[in-house]
Amino acid sequence: MTNDRICIWGLAGISEIKEGDDLSGHIASALRNSGGLASLQERRQGVVLVVAQKVVSKAEGRLVRLDDVVPSTGAKVWANQYRKDARIIEVILREARRVVRMERGVLITETSEGFICANGGVDASNAPVGCVVLLPDDADRSARNLRRDLEAALGISPAVIISDTFGRPWRQGLTNVALGVAGLSPFVDYRGQIDSYGRPLRATLLAVADELAAAGELVMGKTLGIPVAVIEGFKYQDAEGSGRALIRPEEEDLFR
């Protein structure tokens, strides 16, 4: 399965998403107005939508008003030490299944879904004043629901990736990764295939959902106001899909 040419474009025209909004309706309307819907309907396969986690969380009401948060003593101590907002620290700790590292003003936690990330994905950027946004409660379910609703609205069934920006151990900078996946396998498996020197590949399992999420970020950006990227022409393997499948099992993780 090869990809000779892939087109990635940002879907403009999606207004600010609020709690309870019909996100699929906003995306469907923007696709109709973009002039690109006809080509997507003709293509049928090879269409992927990368959707920013932030708009998914907002639509699902995954926001916390900081005025409603009473910080614990531990949150206050940590916040005072590193000049942080104790209320935000408290929200991060509440969202954490496990604190992985708490050092030099950095909080790395494991979320209820098993993602390991800074601040448990709790984010005040692009959030209503006085609020923080949490990760979706179940990002795979969010992706499945969005895909189903778009199919009903538009007659196409694109693969959907819910993405968020994560840091990376041992490397500077951030990159988008897939939290939720629906409609495609999150992997491309080359194991067992033969390389150009005639040797069998033994460990090449590409995290293609993460690669697509990162590619989508190139046209989305943090400040562009474009929460959806459309990827055309990528030949993916049809599957139910799961972002959780990308999490390395604890028994295989050398760094826990």
Image (cartoon, rainbow, N blue to C red):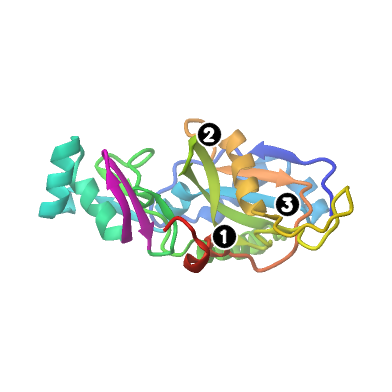
Q: Secondary structure at mark 3?
A: strand
Q: Which of pointers 2 and 1 indicates the residue nearer the eye?
A: 1
Q: Position of residue 167 (x, y in %)?
A: 46, 42
Query: Does the stretch in magenta take in 108?
Result: yes
Q: Work out whether mark 1 precedes mark 3 in sequence or the reverse, and give the earlier one.
A: 3
Which amino acid, mark 3? Val
Q: Residue 246, labelled with which disc? A: 1
Q: Position of residue 127 (x, y in %)?
A: 35, 42
* Residue 125 relative to residue 151: left or right: left
* Residue 17 relative to residue 154: left or right: left
Q: Secondary structure at mark 2?
A: loop
Q: Residue furthest left?
A: 73
Q: Which residues are magenta?
A: 97-111
Any part of residue 230 in sight = yes
Splitting the image into 4 quarters, where does residue 98 fall? bottom left
Residue displayed at 26% across by 38% down: 104
Say which quadrant the N terminus sits in: bottom right
Query: Does the stretch in magenta take in 56?
Result: no
Which amino acid, mark 1? Leu
Q: Residue 47, labelled with which disc? A: 3
Q: Work out whether mark 2 precedes mark 3 in sequence or the reverse, and give the earlier one.
A: 3
How packed is label 2: few (under 14 Cα within 10 Å), some, or many (20 or more)? some
- Nearest the eye: 98 or 224: 98
Residue 131 vertical placement versus 242 (above, below): above
Residue displayed at 76% across by 49% down: 234
